[in-house]
Image (tube, rainbow, N blue to C red):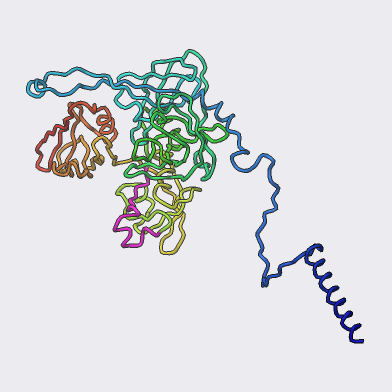
Amino acid sequence: MKKISNLLLVAVFAGAITLGTYKLFFENTNYTVITQEPKANTFQTNYTPTSPKGAGINELDFTTAAEITVNAVVHVKNVTLGSGPTNIMEFFYGSKSSQTPQIGTGSGVIISPDGYIVTNNHVISKANKLQVTLNNNKIYDAELVGTDPNSDIALLKIDAKKQLPYLAFGDSDNVKIGEWVLAVGNPFNLTSTVTAGIVSAKARALGQIDQSFIQTDAAVNPGNSGGALVNTNGDLVGINTAITSQTGSYVGYSFAVPSNIAKKVVEDIMEYGNVLKGIIGITSPPMNSPYAIENGINEIEGVYVDGVEAGSGAEDANIQSGDIIKKVDNIDVRKFSDLIGYISTKRPKDEVELTLIRSNETLIVPVTLKERQALFIAEMGIKVKNLTEEDKKQFKTETGVKIIEVPELYRGYGLKGKILLSVGEDKINNIQEAKTLFGRISRYGKTSITMLNKKGERERLIFQ
């Protein structure tokens, strides 16, 4: 019996070993790893159907706008005669050194089939000769019709004897941030160059320039100045003007004069021979100035009215210091450049509607724009204003303009507060004449100005 029990035990043990070996080596086992997860991960899903073309820029077609634009954008070359190095004979005896041609290049946009071309003032400034090369390589001599240094816009004319391709002005007020645009011009003398980007900002102010610009990241380089900024329909929405760079080449942002401003300047030049500028007549402190920061003005969304000019449309409309302008017509105003950009498209005697906040009350006030009485002269860095009756009586003169702001460079000359009577031999009657005369000054020559002080004494200064 004992023998049988031992055999049974051996059999059971052998069976267990055989079963275990089979399970371990021959049978496939599926394992599930279980972890404690209090909550399942979820993701927000957009079920908008995906375009078969992809997204974003892949769905855009720039070819039509490019084809329309390249033939209407021209290469502008200006030749300026400049004096060579000053020698000892010229210093003592006034002998003239040889004149060396200085050649500058830029771009321009044909805006009419009969050959009117808009470009930047700085592209053609001081030029003795202007030439325009079309996209088909035909070269024409160009005539300067008029210029406005303040907006950096100039108007040229060529006689092509045939209808030319041209671009129509678009409405720059309708341009939206994030909208695709093309910059077309002649950078580095490379004709018909097209670059693409988006509108990065609107109503951008640059330094002390009394102007607002469209900012874009379309690549713009030297030679692009005066070229076209167009939307994807091929409408002209800006004139490429400036870049911000420490190297002189494109580093990410460029700026264009809005088409509504350029169009108004061109129309004024063609109709009146000069640019008519209407102003509201208010002053507003720079948002980054200590005064603005100390008084919390830098945190205001809108234009804070710090002062009102005597005899201006703002004074007639009873605009008051402390008012905050929120809207002009149907344009929202968040900063001073928004207001300036819109007003730059208007003329004296035009009426605009200001929406403003006064003592927590919203008011809508009509304001009639008046002619500008003060002007910044970029060539000298000074600001001048037309004479009032009080000025004429005090200084005993009927002509001239009063110097009201002077840059640091000229403060030691005691210019501020004096009457500027003439530039060279040309008399000055108003601020527009002052701007024109200073605009003719050669960068290579000497300039003399005649002034009148409060004692009635005439003073003459010569600038090199």
Quarter in which the N terminus is drawn: bottom right
Magenta residues span: 279-299
Q: Is residue 334 left or right of residue 94?
A: right
Residue at 21% over, 41% down: 403
Whether the magenta-drawn stretch holds residue 288 is answered as: yes
Q: Is residue 9 left or right of residue 345?
A: right
Of residues 198 and 1, which is closer to you in this image? 1
Residue 175: x %, y % from top left:
52, 41
Magenta stretch: residue 162 in it?
A: no
Q: Position of residue 136 (x, y in %)?
A: 49, 17
Quadrant in which the C terminus appears: top left
The residue at the far top in this view is 161
The picture places residue 437, in percent across and down from the top left corner, at 25, 29
- Residue at 35%, 30% (x, y): give it: 121
Determine which quarter of the picture holds residue 213: top left
Q: x, y percentage for residue 243?
A: 39, 38
Q: Foreground residue, 259 or 207?
A: 207
- Name the residue furthest bottom: 1
Instruction: Tell me the residue at 56%/30% (across/down).
Output: 65
In-front residue for pair 376/89: 89
Q: State how many labels appear.
A: 0
Location of residue 234 by image quarter: top right
**Which residue sits furthest left?**
92
Query: Vertically, is 165 above or below 194?
Result: above
- Front residue (pair 251, 294): 251
Query: In the rendered view, does 429 fall on the left or right side of 296?
Result: left
